[in-house]
Amino acid sequence: MRLPPRCKYYVEGVCDREVPPLEEAGEGRRVRCVRWREIREVRA
């Protein structure tokens, strides 16, 4: 049984294929998300 993704920004076919690289997101933060730049712009 496969569990549904917990992230509301999950993209089937992208997020379930490989683990994204750890990237610097500024202010000492690191992220592992393929959409973090897009999410940051929406929240700004």
Image (cartoon, grey):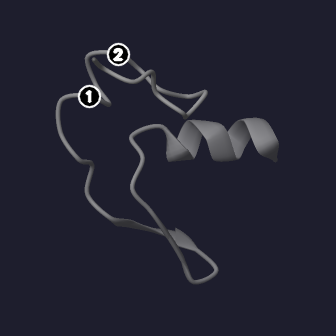
Residue 42 shown left or right of residue 3 in the figure: right
Residue 18, x across and y down, in percent = 18, 39
Residue at coordinates 28% horizontally, 25% vertically from top-left? 14
Above or below residue 15? Residue 26 is below
Residue 19, x across and y down, in percent = 23, 47
Contact between marks 2 and 1 (CB within 8 A): the answer is yes
* Kind of residue indicated by mark 2: Glu
**SS category of the residue bearing label 1:** loop
**In 3D space, how far apart are the residues under numbered discs 2 and 1 (Cα atoms)?**
6 Å
Which residue does the numbered mark 2 point to in the structure image? 12
Numbered circle sitting on residue 16: 1
Residue 23, x across and y down, in percent = 37, 65
* Kind of residue indicated by mark 1: Asp
Residue 24 shown left or right of residue 2 in the figure: right
Q: Nearer the viewer, residue 17 or 34?
A: 17
Residue 43, x across and y down, in percent = 79, 43
Residue at coordinates 58% horizontally, 36% vertically from top-left? 38
Residue at coordinates 32% horizontally, 31% vertically from top-left? 15
Q: Residue furthest bottom?
A: 28
The N terminus - image quarter: top left
Residue 36 shown left or right of residue 21 in the figure: right
